[in-house]
């Protein structure tokens, strides 16, 4: 039980460290599956950190282009 608690705390701490290291000037967070085209591929994520002023270029509609 102690080992699981320590792993959880370490994971949360590492996640916070990674998120604070983002170089977005005006950050916003978007949850839910969204996709965007990067080069000749479609990439997707369930968590997007983006600039509020620029907007999130990833959309739910773009996910329809992924072959399942």
Image: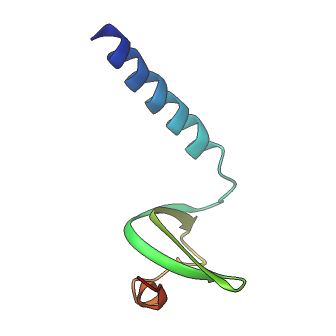
Q: Is residue 35 visible?
A: yes
- The quadrant in which residue 5 appears is top left
- Return the x and y of residue 16 as percentages of the image width and height: 51, 37
In front of the other: 15 or 53: 15
Q: Is residue 57 visible?
A: no
Here the colouring is rainbow
* Residue furthest front in the image: 68
- Return the x and y of residue 20 as percentages of the image width and height: 59, 43
Decide: is 42 above or below 9.
below
Quarter of the figure with the C terminus: bottom left
In the displayed structure, does residue 5 sit left or right of residue 52? left
Decide: is 57 above or below 4.
below
Decide: is 53 above or below 1.
below
In the displayed structure, does residue 62 sit left or right of residue 17? left
In the displayed structure, does residue 39 sit left or right of residue 31? right
What residue appears at the point 65 percent right and 51 percent down from the top-left corner? 22
- The quadrant in which residue 43 appears is bottom right
- Return the x and y of residue 50 as percentages of the image width and height: 56, 66
- Return the x and y of residue 2 as percentages of the image width and height: 32, 8
Decide: is 43 above or below 2.
below
What residue appears at the point 58 percent right and 35 percent down from the top-left corner? 17
In the displayed structure, does residue 3 sit left or right of residue 62? left
């Amino acid at each position: 039980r102690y080992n699981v608690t320590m792993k959880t705390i370490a994971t949360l701490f590492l996640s916070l460290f990674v998120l604070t290291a983002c170089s977005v000037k005006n950050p916003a967070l978007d949850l839910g599956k969204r996709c965007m085209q990067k080069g000749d591929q479609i990439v997707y994520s369930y968590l997007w950190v983006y600039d509020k002023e620029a907007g999130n270029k990833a959309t739910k509609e773009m996910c329809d282009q992924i072959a399942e």
